[in-house]
Image (cartoon, coloured by chain):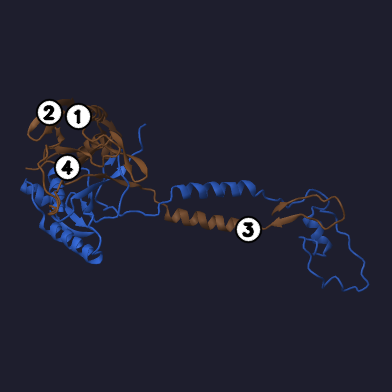
Amino acid sequence: MDRYEPKRHHNPHAHVIHAPGARLMHGVKLRYVWNKVSGHGHRSPNASLNLVSFIDFLSVIVIFLLMSFSASGEIAVDKNVKLPKAENVDAIIDAPMVAVNGNQILVDGVQAGSTRSIEELGRLQKIDELFALLKNKRELWKQVQPNKPFPGVCILQVDQNVSALVVKSVFQTAAFAGYPNVSFMVGKIPASQ
Amino acid sequence: MGGVDVDTGGKKRSTNSEINMVPFIDLLFVTVAFLLITAVWVTNSRINADAQVPGPPNPNIELTPQTPEKVLNLHIGESDFGLVWKQGATVVSEVKVPKTPMEIGDGDGKIIRYPELAKKIEEEWKQQGGHRDPSDKKLDQCILHSDNRTQFKEIVAVLDALYSPKREMKLGAETKKIPVFNMTFSVR
């Protein structure tokens, strides 16, 4: 910035009202302020910020977040279920969720049986509550979409420490209720190759 | 802020123009905030299985007796795995694979894997598998035999090994790599 050079006016009050200027500080007619911001002839205390690197940084974040964006959203997993992990997996699909933890069986959050009772009995069995809930869901789906073939898919969220007996019982009950295509929800681990 | 400087060199009106960067930075901030809020950090997937329930018979198609397909029976034992190919009740081949788990991590987050089993299953499929052509929509079947006390994480480790060998399949115009086997449980 240059030093302030006042213009000569005929009217002594003409500097009070004037047309707004386009440049910063040029409209300020106070000698002190002008000299202050221009550094009294020395280096100006005003520093301009380089926005290029800042915009680059923001753009990289936007691209990264867009790449990792999932339109399907997050699928709710029962907090008592610790899923096992696998490498050779498929993408998740929209289907009824059956959560199986160490104590109970839930269908979309509604209780549908007890894991303990299956383990205590010690043999494979049809779980009546689960069967009824899944059958109701199937009939509801058929009423809503009468012209489409029923896919018969359900997803099991099974805790990693649950025994095979419980898994087989739930699997078999789902098949009886009209869901022969059963998938197991797992955590994904990156491919080793 | 941002600008384009073009020196005209004369007394003409300056061709320098300034782009206001504030709305652009605001837009970037809003996009970052939206994507951060909607970000899904935990990615879950699924392993497919099939209960092998036959569909209702079609009255318009005459049923012709067919020779049963070869099916892989995978037995999870205490110290080894048994890979038994059966055609109906006839045992075609039988192989034992020692149980050598590869454990990743420790504690509750420990992951079990069976790379030796995955290799052996792939070799077996290359020898005995019946559905190899990319136009063939059917998959080879595998029946999993496990003890009732086996933990689910071990079953998933075996399924991970089972779904490791893949083949190409034509799905419409595109070709996809899909696992060669489809699995179901054995029950009495």
Look at label 3 and name its amino acid: Val
Q: Which residue corresponds to the image point at 86% horizontal and 59% vertical from the top-left?
A: A4
Which residue is under mark 1?
Answer: B128
Residue type at the position of mark 1: Gln
Q: Amino acid at mark 2?
A: Val
Residues at marks 2 and 1 touching, judged by CB atoms closer than 8 Å: yes
Q: Colour of chain A?
A: blue
Is label 4 or label 2 in front? 2
**Chain for numbered disc 3:** B
Question: Does label 4 or label 2 sit earlier along the sequence?
Answer: 2
Disc ID at residue B92: 2
Q: Position of residue B183 (x, y in %)?
A: 19, 41
Which marked residue is nearer to the observer: mark 1 or mark 3? 1
- Measure the alpha-carbon separation of dots 3 and 4: 59 Å
Q: Classify mark 4: helix, strand or loop.
A: strand
Chain B pictured colour: brown
Q: Amino acid at mark 4?
A: Thr
